[in-house]
């Protein structure tokens, strides 16, 4: 045997999907047109749930009735407090034999308003913010921002806000210093380039025309808010308002091979999971497609994966056929559908090239997350890795492995560890992302498409 032949047989390198399967690129492009629309319609977790419900309803899904009876192929969903959603297609086998769970998160890093946000300083009006999730604060200055959220008015009416998205809408922004005067700021560490209390959003500059008034610019802003939404300053305490990048999802590159957009972590997996769920006809095992909130702040809270809502839902499904949730969980398996860091040639020092995922090499299977000796990791077993790899290879999915950066450089976590707490097999699978958590994140269309293919195969 020649060395070359032996090398071919014994060594392994993940191929470039764009090179290996050029015929798949048009399919990926088509799939990503829907994905870009999903990104533009869902800039917050609530909007993602609303968009999902619209798509599900159009596909024949109905709200689940735990007192009802369902047949294989029946499709249902359950919304959790407007911010998370569980979606099911009933399978041919009893739930007792286990379900197939695919869980993505639909919250993304952003600037939340503080409960008392509005103030005036030197004849300009601003909103105070508290950032949500792990973001690099300096990236969020001088970026056009849109306002999204809800206010529960004192008359009980819930007002939905979305301003800065439509052509002609005003946008908002955080200011930064000019280079001419930033000598002192330049000496700060990058993480303090813009500090938390400097993430103040410009909202107005015209004073209310009355000389008797103190803070007339603030009053003018309040007058406009009252005209538009019927709210007063007290109502901010009854609100959840999020400022997010105002730009729309775009193709990136001469070859249009990539997508640049806000919130791709993790709406890219959420959309792929949703499409795989909708297209799944009569699966062997009952599905639970899970789009959850609060992953970016550690999954705490009653709309996050550290709460009981998934286990309770499994319990209700079990009870419908007289089974027990513990048995269902023990027989179930799950994909934690989340993104991983794509190898960035400009910042190659943070990655181990042998164990990184690469743009255009397909979806990324991440055995473990965590940091510093796998602390806080869900470390998937060899048996479960083998099961998931077999599913992908049989379905002709382009996939690769990845880890969250080189050892001891940093790290991160996903919802996987909360699912494994329920005694369910789980591993991370998702899309490689460049500039993760930035206002403009980058993904490759071939990777998005192959992630969707992997999710579909998992349900089949
Ligand atoms: Mn994520
Ligand atoms: Mn994230």
Image (spheres, helix red, strand yellow):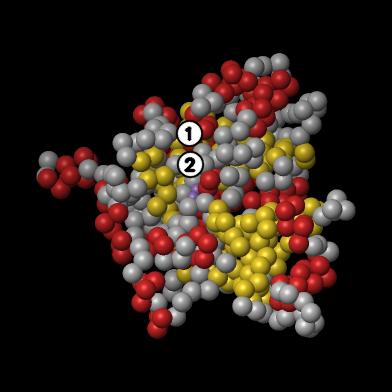
Q: Position of residue 356 (x, y in %)?
A: 32, 50
- Which quadrant holds residue 98? top right
Q: Secondary structure at mark 1?
A: helix
**Left-right relation of 8 to 273:** left
**Quadrant of the image occupied by residue 280:** top right
Q: Nearer the viewer, residue 260 or 106?
A: 106
Decide if ligand 1 comes within 8 Å of the CB at mark 2: yes
Q: Residue at x 53, y 62 (%)?
A: 197
**Which residue is labeled 2 in the image?**
414
- Number of other residues with Cα within 10 Å of mark 1, as a class: few under 14, some 14 to 19, many 20 or more: many
Say which residue appears at 63% left-offset and 20% top-offset: 325
Percent from the top left, x then y, of residue 194? 46, 66
**Mark 2: few, some, or many residues within 10 Å (few <14, many ≥20)?**
many
1 or 423, nearer to the observer: 423
270 in relation to 24, above or below: above
Q: Position of residue 428 (x, y in %)?
A: 45, 40
Whole-angstrom CA distance, mark 1 to mark 2, is: 7 Å
**Residue at the image point whose x is 41% and y is 44% from the top:** 412
- In percent of width and height, residue 300 lies at 57, 39
Is residue 315 depicted above or below 240 in this figure? above
Question: In terms of depth relative to the viewer, which is nearer, 70 or 335?
Answer: 335
Q: Is residue 421 above or below residue 130?
A: above
Does residue 380 show up?
Answer: yes
Which quarter of the figure is the C terminus placed in?
top right
Q: Determine the residue located farthest toward the left in the rendered image.
A: 2
Closer-to-camera residue (65/132): 132
The residue that label 1 is drawn on is: 417
Whether pointer 1 and pointer 2 mark residues with C-beta atoms closer than 8 Å, the reply is yes
Rendered image quadrant of residue 200: bottom right
Question: Would you say the beta carbon of the disc 1 residue lies within 8 angstroms of ligand 1?
Answer: no
Secondary structure under tag 2 reads: loop
């Amino acid at each position: 045997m020649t060395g070359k032949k032996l090398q071919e047989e014994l060594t392994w390198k993940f191929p470039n999907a764009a090179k290996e399967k050029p015929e798949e690129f048009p399919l990926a492009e088509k799939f990503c047109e829907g994905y870009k629309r999903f990104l533009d319609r869902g800039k917050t977790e609530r909007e993602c749930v609303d968009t999902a419900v619209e798509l599900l309803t159009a596909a024949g899904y109905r709200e689940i009735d735990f007192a009802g009876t369902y047949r294989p192929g029946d499709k249902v969903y359950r919304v959790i407090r407007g911010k998370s959603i569980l979606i099911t297609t009933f399978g041919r086998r009893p739930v007792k034999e286990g379900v197939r769970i695919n869980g993505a998160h639909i919250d993304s890093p952003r600037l939340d308003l503080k409960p008392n946000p509005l103030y005036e300083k030197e004849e300009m009006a601003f909103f105070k913010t508290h950032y949500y999730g792990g973001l690099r604060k300096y990236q969020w200055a001088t970026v056009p921002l849109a306002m999204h959220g809800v206010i529960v008015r004192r008359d009980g009416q819930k007002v939905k806000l979305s301003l800065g998205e439509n052509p002609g809408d005003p946008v908002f922004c955080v200011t930064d210093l000019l280079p001419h005067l930033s000598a002192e700021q330049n000496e700060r560490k990058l993480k303090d380039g813009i500090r938390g209390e400097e993430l103040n959003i410009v909202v107005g500059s015209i004073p209310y025309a009355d000389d008797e008034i103190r803070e007339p610019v603030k009053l003018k802003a309040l007058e406009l808010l009252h005209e538009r939404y019927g709210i007063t300053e007290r109502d901010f305490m009854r609100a959840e308002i999020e400022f997010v990048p105002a730009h729309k999802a775009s193709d990136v590159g001469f070859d249009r091979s990539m997508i640049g957009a806000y919130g791709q972590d993790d709406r890219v997996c959420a959309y792929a999971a949703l499409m795989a769920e909708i297209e799944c006809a009569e699966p062997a095992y009952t599905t639970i497609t899970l789009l959850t909130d609060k992953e970016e702040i550690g999954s705490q809270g009653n709309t996050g994966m550290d709460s009981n809502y998934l286990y309770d839902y499994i319990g209700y499904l079990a009870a419908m056929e007289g089974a027990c949730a513990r048995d269902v969980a023990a027989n179930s398996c799950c994909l934690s559908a989340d993104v991983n860091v794509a190898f960035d040639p400009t910042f190659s020092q943070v990655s181990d090239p042998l164990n990184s995922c690469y743009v255009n090499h397909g979806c990324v299977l991440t055995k473990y997350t965590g940091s510093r000796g796998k602390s806080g990791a869900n470390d998937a077993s060899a048996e479960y890795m083998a099961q998931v790899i077999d599913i992908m290879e049989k379905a002709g999915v382009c996939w690769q492995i990845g880890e969250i950066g080189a050892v001891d450089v940093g790290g991160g976590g996903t919802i996987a560890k909360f699912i494994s707490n329920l005694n369910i097999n789980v591993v991370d699978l998702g899309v490689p992302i460049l500039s993760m958590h930035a206002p403009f994140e980058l993904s490759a269309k071939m990777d998005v498409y192959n992630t969707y293919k992997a999710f579909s195969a998992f349900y089949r």
